[in-house]
Image (cartoon, rainbow, N blue to C red):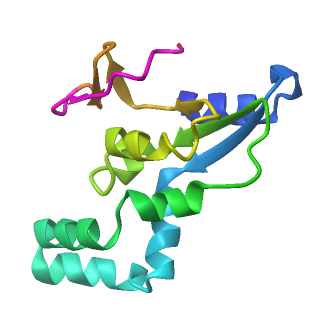
Amino acid sequence: MTVQQFIRQISSDQSVGCRLMECNLYQTFLSICEDLDILEDIPEMEAGDGGSFLLEQLHSAIGEGEYIEKIQYEPHMPGDILMITGVGDVFPFMRVHSLLEALQPHFSDVPILVMYPGEFDGYRLKLFNRLQPNDYYRAFNVI
């Protein structure tokens, strides 16, 4: 709740001196599923075939490219910051370290701020401070 309040506050604060472009990964995931016309089938697929099968199918149907297509906007302007939220909500359908690597060529002129529910020790992202960490070397802690 604290993070959600913080996001609302900085998104509406006109004195921050930048243009925040928020991307909620979970909302993006749902939008991609709607575009593929699979959103309504997901609960039935999980119940019938199991969570592992569902995850495998979603990974084969939705990759970083589909997210980038939804996230991309033009024109990028000086002072833009892409703020990524919903990281915990979209796990395990999308791993943020993979998405960040894929976003780099498309947003090389825009800083990316990730509201990450976990820990970054300067070398590894550890989701929820519990899951196996993934290396990501281009990040740094803001808060």
Q: Which stretch is magenta?
A: 130-142
The spot of residue 15 in percent (x, y) is 87, 21
In the rendered structure, the answer to whether residue 117 lies left or right of residue 112 reads left
In the rendered structure, the answer to whether residue 41 lies left or right of residue 45 reads right
> What residue is drawn where x is 57% and y is 36%?
108
Foreground pick, 15 / 70: 70
The spot of residue 80 in percent (x, y) is 73, 35
Image: 73 above or below 125: below
Image: 44 above or below 83: below
Verify whether residue 74 appears in magenta.
no
Foreground pick, 30 / 82: 82
> What residue is drawn where x is 27% and y is 70%?
58
Foreground pick, 51 / 21: 21
Foreground pick, 68 / 22: 68
What's the magenta bit mostly, secondary-structure-wise? loop
The spot of residue 8 in percent (x, y) is 70, 36
